[in-house]
């Protein structure tokens, strides 16, 4: 492209700029605002453009930086609002969420005591496998196999297929 740019150069790049803005913002109105802000900045600071640089790359750079600035500004604004507004009202869970939570708790109650204890220690309390093994005074391999069986059983309950433990024949 030439060292200087004109309206025709900008019109030619508009679809690409808009596509890039849509990929950043994911909203058409926000993308249009971002393109406008980018072009405004480019026109007002055209003297800062390197003469040997690509116009398209320069505009993409401006757009990306304008996007990042807007994101930072939105975070600061949200932080200030939270200070003045206090605690936001919590939305009540939907009936579907309540039903799914109750079903998950019922399924959790169907597990053996050992499996429940291990799931609580590892998944809820965040203990490592070794820490859980030490806490329950069982070998590490036992922790891993019980967790595997417990997770498999929960998946089976969730799918509507109760998992029965395989019977072992001991001789």
Image (tube, rainbow, N blue to C red):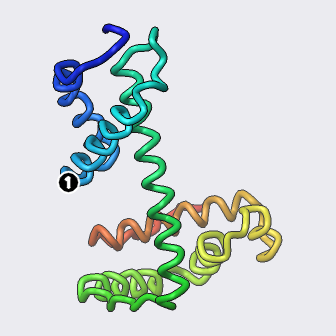
Q: Is residue 80 left or right of residue 129?
A: left
In the depicted structure, whether residue 57 falls above or below residue 29: above
Mark 1: which secondary structure?
A: helix
Q: Is residue 166 shown to the viewer in this render?
A: no
Where, by quadrant of the figure, is residue 98 drawn?
A: bottom left
Percent x, y for residue 58?
41, 24
* Residue found at x 34% / y 21%: 56
Q: Is residue 38 shown to the viewer in this render?
A: yes
Residue position marked by numbered label 1 in the rendering? 29
Percent x, y for residue 94?
26, 86
| Position of the N terminus by quadrant | top left
Percent x, y for residue 126?
67, 70
User: Could you classify mark 1 by the number of other residues whose Cα lies within 10 Å: few (under 14), some (14-19), or many (20 or more)?
Assistant: few
Where, by quadrant of the figure, is residue 43 drawn?
A: top left
Where, by quadrant of the figure, is residue 123 drawn?
A: bottom right
In the depicted structure, whether residue 159 falls above or below residue 114: above
* Residue found at x 67% / y 76%: 125
Task: Using the image as rendered, state which of residue 49 and residue 86 is in the foreground.
Answer: 49
Q: Is residue 121 left or right of residue 57?
A: right
Q: Is residue 32 left or right of residue 56?
A: left
Percent x, y for residue 107?
40, 81
Task: Using the image as rendered, state which of residue 141 and residue 55 is in the foreground.
Answer: 55
* Residue found at x 24% / y 20%: 6
* Residue found at x 39% / y 91%: 89
Task: Using the image as rendered, state which of residue 52 and residue 45 is in the foreground.
Answer: 45
């Amino acid at each position: 492209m030439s060292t200087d740019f004109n309206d025709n150069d900008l019109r030619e790049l508009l679809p690409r700029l808009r596509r890039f803005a849509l990929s950043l913002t994911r909203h058409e109105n926000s993308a249009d605002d971002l393109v406008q802000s980018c072009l405004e900045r480019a026109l007002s600071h055209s003297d800062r453009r390197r003469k040997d640089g690509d116009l398209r790359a320069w505009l993409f750079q401006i757009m990306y930086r304008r996007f990042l600035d807007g994101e930072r500004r939105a975070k600061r604004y949200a932080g200030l609002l939270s200070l003045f507004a206090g605690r936001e009202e919590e939305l009540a869970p939907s009936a579907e969420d309540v039903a799914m939570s109750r079903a998950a708790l019922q399924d959790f109650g169907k597990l053996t005591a050992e499996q429940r204890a291990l799931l609580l220690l590892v998944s809820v309390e965040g203990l490592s496998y070794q820490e859980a093994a030490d806490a329950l005074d069982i070998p590490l391999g036992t922790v891993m196999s019980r967790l595997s069986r417990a997770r498999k059983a929960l998946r089976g309950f969730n799918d509507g297929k109760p998992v029965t433990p395989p019977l072992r024949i001991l001789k």
